[in-house]
C-alpha cells in the first residue's frame, strides 16, 4: 500500500463518516459539521494528489485546496446564520420536526 | 570576542550535542532548545508579575508587595507556592474533561508560538518559510481554549465572560493580521528571520526599523492596540474584569489550573511582544549602529521587557472599555485604518527614495486618522436608553 | 508508511467519529476541532505547509468557533429528550457505507496506475504568492467577492427582526 493509497483511504473514510453524520443526526448544526468534514476529506484528497502527482510545482492541488478552505468557511458562516434564523422562527433545530412547508 | 558573546548560546548548544552520535544530534538539539524556552519564559513571567504588581502599585500611589523579601522580590515564589498548594476545586456539574483540558490547550498553543521567534542572530528554533502564518495559527487556537474554559464551568458568569472574550479576540484578530501583512508586503517574505534581516541595516547611525516609517509607525500602533485586546489586557479586559464578572472565564478555576491560565496570559503577552519587536522594532538588531557590539539576544529581550513595561503602564493609566465600544472601535476604526495602512505601505514602496514619500504617506495617514476619528467615533447617540433582551 | 501517518490518521478518524456519535453537541464541536487539527498535521506531513497552517487558522480558529457560537445561540447544548439520531438513521448509515465501499474499491483497484513516491516538492510562499497573482488571479478575485457576499448575506439572514416580537 503506497502512501498515496493510505491518504486516499483516510479521505474516503472521513468522507463517509461526514456523510453518515449529515444523514443521521437530528440537530441541524451537526449536519453542517458533517458537511464540513466532507469538504475537509475532499481537501485531503486534493493535497495528496498534488504531492504525489506528476507536476507538484504547478501548485494546482494546493491552490484548489486553499480556495476550497475559503469557500467552506464562507458556506459555514451562511449555513449557521440560516440555522439561527430558522431557530428563531421554529424554536427548535430538530430536523425531524421541520417536515412541513407551512411556516 | 564580540561574535563569541553574540553566538554564545549557539556554540554552547553545538558543544553539548557534539557528544552524541550524528543521527541523534538534531533531535536532542531541538529538545534542549525547547527545554530552555519552557524554563526561561516562566522565569520571565515571574519577573513580569512582580514588575506589574510593583509598577501598578506605584502608579496608584501605593507600594506594591513589599513583605516577602527585600522590596518584595520573593513575591513570585510565594505566589507559586500558594497556587501549587491550593485545593483544586472542580464544580460538581462542570464538564470534567473539557474543564481539565482548557488550560492545557492554552499553555500548549501559547508556547508553540515561540518556535518561530528569532531571539538573536541564528537563534530561531525552527526557521520556517511561513513562520508568521504558523504564529497566527497558534494564536487562533488560544481562542478555542478560552471558550472551553468558560463553557465547561457551567456558570453563567463564566460563559458570558468567555463569549465576550472570544468575540473580542476574533474582532481584533483581523487588525492584528492586517497590520502584519503590511510588513510582509514590504519585506516580501513570511519568514521572520528574513523580516529581521531586512531591518538590520543602518543609514548613518539610524536603523532601518519599520517603526521609523510612516506606515510602520501607524502599523505598530494598531498592532499594539490589537495585541492588548488579543491578550485581554486593560483597557480591553472586560472579560476578566474583577468588578464586572467575578473573574470571567476563569472563575471556576483554582490552584494550579488558575496558575496555568495566568501563566498562559503572560507568556502570550511575551510571545506577541516578541512578534511585535520582530515585525516592527527590528527584532534582535541594535538601535544605533555604534551599539552593534552588544549581543543580539540582549536587544531582543530588552525590547520585549520594554513592551511589557508599556503594557503595564497602559493598564495603570487607561479606564476599561465597554464591550460594544471595544467592538465598535475594532470594526469601524482600526480595521479601515489597517487597510489604508496597506495602501500607504504600497505607495511608500513604489514612490522610491526621497523626501516626497515621507510627506505624502504621513499626510495620508494623519488626514485619514483625523477624518475617521471625527466620523466614526462621535458620541452623540445619547437618547433614552433602549433595552434589548436576549431570547 | 510512517508511524506518524498512522497516528495522525487515527486521531483524525477518531475525531470525526466522535463528532458524529456523541450526544452533547458542544462535545461534537470540540471533537470535530480535533479532526480539523489532525487534518492540518496530515497536510504538513504532505509538505503542504501553507495549506496546513491555513487549515488551522481558518477551521480551528474561525469555523469551530462559529459552530460553537451557533450551538450556544440555538440552545443546542441542552440534552435532547428523544434520541439524537433521526428516524431513518439506518438508511443514512447504509448509504454512507455504500459510498465508502465504492470509493475504497476505486482507490484499491487503481493502486497500480496511481503515481508512487516522488521527490519532495519545495514550495515556498513566494511561489504561492506568484501563482495567486498570475495564474490564479481570477479565482482569487472571485473568492474575494464570494466572501464579501457571504459575509453580508450571513449578517442579513441572522439579523434580529426588530419589527416582530418587541
Image: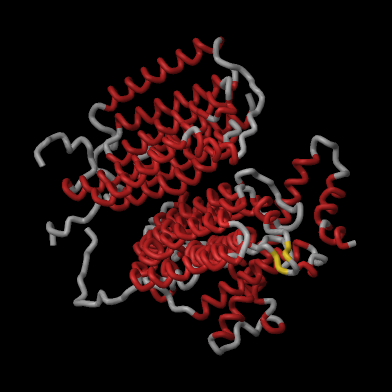
On-image quarter of the N terminus of chain B: bottom right
Which residue reaches farthest left?
A: A102
> Which residue: 31% across, 36% down?
A31
Counting from the top left corner in percent of width and height, residue A66 is at: 47, 36
> Which residue: 82% across, 56% down?
B7
Counting from the top left corner in percent of width and height, residue B86 is at: 56, 67
Q: Along the horizontal axis of the image, is B103 left or right of B121?
A: left
Which residue reaches farthest bottom?
A: B61
Residue A44 vertical placement versus B360 (above, below): above
> Which residue: 49% across, 61% down?
B230
Asked if one can make out residue B275 in the rendered structure from this viewpoint, the answer is yes
Residue B194 vertical placement versus C28 (above, below): below
Residue A24 figure quarter: top left
Asked if one can make out residue B266 in the rendered structure from this viewpoint, the answer is no
Residue B289 figure quarter: bottom right
Colour mapping? secondary structure
Q: Along the horizontal axis of the image, is B208 left or right of A37?
A: right
> Which residue: 51% across, 65% down?
B360
Q: Along the horizontal axis of the image, is A10 left or right of B381?
A: right
Name the residue nearer the viewer: B262 or A55: A55
Counting from the top left corner in percent of width and height, residue B308 is at: 61, 70
Name the residue nearer the viewer: B70 or B384: B384
Name the residue nearer the viewer: C6 or B217: B217
Which residue reaches farthest right?
A: B1
Amino acid at each position: 500500500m503506497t502512501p498515496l493509497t493510505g491518504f486516499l483511504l483516510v479521505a474516503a473514510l472521513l468522507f463517509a463518516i461526514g456523510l453518515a453524520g449529515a444523514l443521521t443526526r437530528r440537530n441541524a448544526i451537526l449536519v453542517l459539521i458533517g458537511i464540513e468534514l466532507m469538504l475537509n476529506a475532499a481537501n485531503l484528497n486534493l493535497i495528496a494528489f498534488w504531492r504525489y502527482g506528476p507536476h507538484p510545482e504547478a501548485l494546482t492541488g494546493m491552490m484548489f485546496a486553499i480556495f476550497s478552505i475559503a469557500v467552506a468557511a464562507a458556506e459555514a458562516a451562511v449555513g449557521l446564520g440560516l440555522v439561527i434564523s430558522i431557530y428563531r422562527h421554529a424554536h427548535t433545530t430538530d430536523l425531524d420536526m421541520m417536515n412541513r412547508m407551512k411556516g | 570576542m564580540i561574535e563569541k558573546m553574540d553566538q554564545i548560546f549557539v556554540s554552547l548548544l553545538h558543544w553539548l550535542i557534539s557528544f552524541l552520535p550524528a543521527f541523534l544530534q538534531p533531535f536532542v538539539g531541538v529538545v534542549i532548545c525547547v527545554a530552555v524556552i519552557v524554563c526561561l519564559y516562566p522565569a520571565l513571567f515571574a519577573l513580569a508579575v512582580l514588575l506589574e504588581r510593583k509598577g501598578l502599585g506605584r502608579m496608584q500611589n501605593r507600594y506594591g508587595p513589599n513583605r516577602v523579601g527585600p522590596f518584595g522580590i520573593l513575591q513570585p515564589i510565594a505566589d507559586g507556592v500558594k497556587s501549587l498548594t491550593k485545593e483544586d476545586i472542580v464544580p460538581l456539574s462542570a464538564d470534567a474533561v473539557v474543564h481539565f483540558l482548557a488550560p492545557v490547550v492554552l499553555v500548549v498553543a501559547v508556547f508553540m508560538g515561540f518556535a518561530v521567534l528569532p531571539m538573536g542572530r541564528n537563534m530561531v528554533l525552527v526557521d520556517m518559510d511561513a513562520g508568521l502564518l504558523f504564529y497566527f495559527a497558534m494564536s487562533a487556537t488560544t481562542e478555542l481554549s478560552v471558550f472551553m474554559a468558560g463553557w465547561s464551568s457551567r456558570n453563567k458568569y463564566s460563559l458570558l465572560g468567555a463569549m465576550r472574550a472570544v468575540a473580542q479576540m476574533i474582532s481584533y484578530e483581523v487588525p492584528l493580521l492586517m497590520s502584519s501583512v503590511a510588513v510582509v508586503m514590504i519585506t516580501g517574505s513570511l519568514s521572520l528571520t528574513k523580516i529581521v534581516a531586512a531591518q538590520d541595516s543602518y543609514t548613518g547611525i539610524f536603523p532601518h526599523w519599520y517603526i521609523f516609517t510612516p506606515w510602520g509607525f501607524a502599523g505598530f500602533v494598531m498592532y499594539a492596540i490589537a495585541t492588548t485586546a488579543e491578550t485581554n489586557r486593560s483597557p480591553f479586559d472586560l472579560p476578566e474584569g474583577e468588578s464586572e464578572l467575578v473573574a470571567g472565564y476563569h472563575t471556576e478555576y483554582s490552584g494550579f489550573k488558575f496558575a496555568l491560565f495566568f501563566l498562559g496570559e503572560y507568556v502570550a503577552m511575551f510571545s506577541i511582544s516578541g512578534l511585535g519587536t520582530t515585525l516592527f522594532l527590528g527584532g534582535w538588531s541594535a538601535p544605533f549602529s555604534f551599539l552593534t557590539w552588544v549581543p543580539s539576544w540582549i536587544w531582543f529581550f530588552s525590547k520585549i521587557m520594554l513592551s511589557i513595561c508599556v503594557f503595564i503602564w497602559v493598564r495603570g493609566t487607561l479606564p476599561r472599555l465597554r464591550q460594544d465600544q471595544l467592538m465598535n472601535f475594532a470594526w469601524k476604526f482600526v480595521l479601515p485604518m489597517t487597510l489604508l495602512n496597506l495602501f500607504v505601505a504600497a505607495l511608500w514602496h513604489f514612490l522610491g527614495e526621497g523626501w516626497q514619500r515621507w510627506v505624502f504617506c504621513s499626510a495620508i495617514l494623519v488626514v485619514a486618522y483625523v477624518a475617521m476619528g471625527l466620523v466614526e467615533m462621535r458620541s452623540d447617540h445619547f437618547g433614552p436608553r433602549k433595552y434589548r433582551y436576549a431570547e | 508508511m510512517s508511524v506518524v501517518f498512522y497516528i495522525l490518521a487515527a486521531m483524525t478518524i477518531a475525531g470525526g467519529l466522535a463528532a458524529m456519535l456523541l450526544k452533547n453537541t458542544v462535545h461534537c464541536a470540540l471533537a470535530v476541532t480535533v479532526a480539523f487539527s489532525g487534518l492540518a498535521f496530515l497536510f504538513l506531513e504532505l509538505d503542504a505547509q501553507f495549506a496546513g497552517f491555513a487549515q488551522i487558522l481558518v477551521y480551528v480558529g474561525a469555523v469551530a468557533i462559529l459552530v460553537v457560537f451557533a450551538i450556544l445561540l440555538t440552545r443546542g447544548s441542552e440534552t435532547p429528550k428523544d434520541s439524537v439520531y433521526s428516524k431513518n438513521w439506518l438508511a443514512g448509515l447504509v448509504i454512507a457505507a455504500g459510498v465508502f465501499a465504492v470509493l475504497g474499491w476505486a482507490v484499491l483497484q487503481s493502486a497500480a496506475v496511481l503515481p508512487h513516491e516522488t521527490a519532495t516538492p519545495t514550495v515556498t510562499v513566494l511561489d504561492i504568492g506568484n501563482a495567486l497573482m498570475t495564474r490564479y488571479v481570477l479565482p482569487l478575485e472571485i473568492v474575494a467577492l464570494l466572501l464579501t457576499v457571504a459575509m453580508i448575506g450571513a449578517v442579513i439572514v441572522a439579523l434580529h427582526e426588530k419589527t416582530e416580537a418587541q
